[in-house]
Image (cartoon, rainbow, N blue to C red):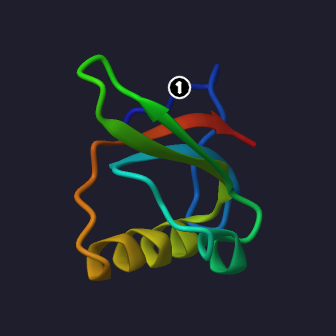
Amino acid sequence: MIVNKDKPQLTLDQMVTYQIKVPGKLDENWPDWAGELDVTVESDAEGLLVSTLTGQLDQAALLGLLRRLYSLGLPLISVICLEVV
């Protein structure tokens, strides 16, 4: 295992800021269960709507969110780790 001492090491229970993008516009009920996530909707380069969820999650919460998106039939455009807190 290679350890980079310049970067914080990610653990399962560590809070990380993630950005998740899915196609379409999420409805108004998302804030009810998305908790502390910020939800924004923008048009992509082709004029299609894309919803972006940004917030701090640990690995368990991230998996729960991804499962919820999957159960709603929303394909993932991207999942990006923005910052290890």
Residue at x 41%, y 29% (from the top left corner):
43
Between 4 and 35, the residue placed more toward the observer is 35
Q: Amino acid at mark 1?
A: Asn
Q: Residue at x 44, y 53 (%)?
A: 25
Specify whether 2 is left or right of 53: left
Q: Quadrant of the N terminus?
A: top left
Q: Residue at x 64, y 19 (%)?
A: 6
Q: Is residue 68 left or right of residue 61?
A: left
Where does the image place residue 56, in percent across and percent down from the top left? 70, 53
**59 shown above or below 19:** below
User: Mark 1: which secondary structure?
Assistant: loop
Q: Is residue 15 above or below residue 80?
A: below
Q: Residue at x 23, y 21 (%)?
A: 46
Spot occupied by residue 81 in the image (x, y as percentages of width and height): 51, 39
Q: For this rendering, which residue is in front, 57 or 26?
A: 26
Residue placed under numbered mark 1 in the picture: 4
Q: Give left or right: position of 7 versus 73.
A: right
